Structure formats: structure tokens, C-alpha cells
Amino acid sequence: MTGLKFGESYSWPDGLKVTVVEAKVFTDWDAEAYETPDPSLTEFRVRLKLENTGKQPADLGDLSTIVEGATNGGRAAGSEFERGSEPLEGQLAPGVSAVKTDDNSLESRYGKKVVVRVQRASEDGVFEFIEFAGAIAG
């Protein structure tokens, strides 16, 4: 499914709902963890809100993301910044919501407009792709 914008939501039939809240330039570097910005890259954090409106726990390990430049190509490389990281892992109980993060680096030449593809693996191994478009703030 395509055509969703940051801030809009998608719900799978089992009640797991996902919203790409934002993508924002990351600046909270941890020097003790040897993190430093790379001037040739746009390094950013995507925030995803997940809500389980279903009756069964949802395995967040079934979710993954792919981030691509939406202006003139490019694919972001996955990363994990030390401070504030909340990776897509664990389970989400019925009636519970959580905000998770996905950290990325994209060559600056590809601009700040991106498509965030949220993938979910089904029990039969088929992936569903939901696309959210927006701009990296900051």
C-alpha cells in the first residue's frame, strides 16, 4: 500500500496499527560510544507509533523498515544511535501502544524527502509493504 503520509496510520487485520510519526535529523551524539556525525550524510531517526488494538500479542520482530530517498534515489543504511534508541523488538500486548525508533544514514546528495517502507512478515513468510512519505525535519 502506498500513498500514506507521515502522521497517517495503517492497521493490519489483526489490529496492529502503525504510524510513521516523523523522521528527524539526529544530533544527540554519544562521544563516549565514539559516535560522531558524518558531514556527507543525513543521519536521522524515524519514530514509529505502534498500537495493538487486537486480541493477541503482536510480535514486533515481524516488522522491519526500508528507507529510500524520494527525490532522486538512494537507499538509507540502517544504524542504531546510542541515545534514545527503541528498536523494533519484543511483543506488544493487546491494548498497549509504544513508540519505537529506526535509525538511518542517507547520503546528503539524495535530499531530505524519504519513503519509509514498513514491512511485516506473515506466518506464511509473505511480506506486506506499507509506504509512508515525508521529509526529514531538521
Image (cartoon, grey):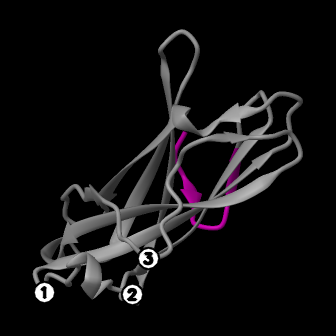
Residue 71, label in figure: none
Q: Which residue: 37% across, 82% down?
A: 25
Classify 112 as above or below 132: below
Q: How many numbered marks appear? A: 3
Question: What is the secondary structure assignment of the residue under circle 3?
Answer: loop
Which segment did they paint magenta?
1-10
Of 14 and 131, the residue lying toward us: 14
User: 105 or 74, which lies in front?
Assistant: 105
Gap in angstroms between the C-alphas marked 2 and 3: 7 Å
Q: Kindly tell me whether residue 19 is visible in this rendering.
A: yes
Q: Is residue 8 magenta?
A: yes
Q: Earlier in the sequence, mark 2 or mark 3?
A: 2
- Taking the spot 38% from the left edge, 64% from the top edge, the residue there is 103
Mark 3, other Cα within 10 Å: few <14 / some 14–19 / many ≥20: few
- Contact between marks 2 and 3 (CB within 8 A): the answer is yes
Residue at x 83%, y 50% (from the top left corner): 96
Q: Quadrant of the N terminus?
A: top right
Q: Which residue is mark 2?
A: 28
Disc 3 designates what residue? 83
- Residue 71 in sight in this render: no
**Amino acid type shown at disc 2:** Asp
Q: Could you tell me which quadrant the C terminus lies in?
A: bottom left
Q: Main secondary structure of the magenta part?
A: loop
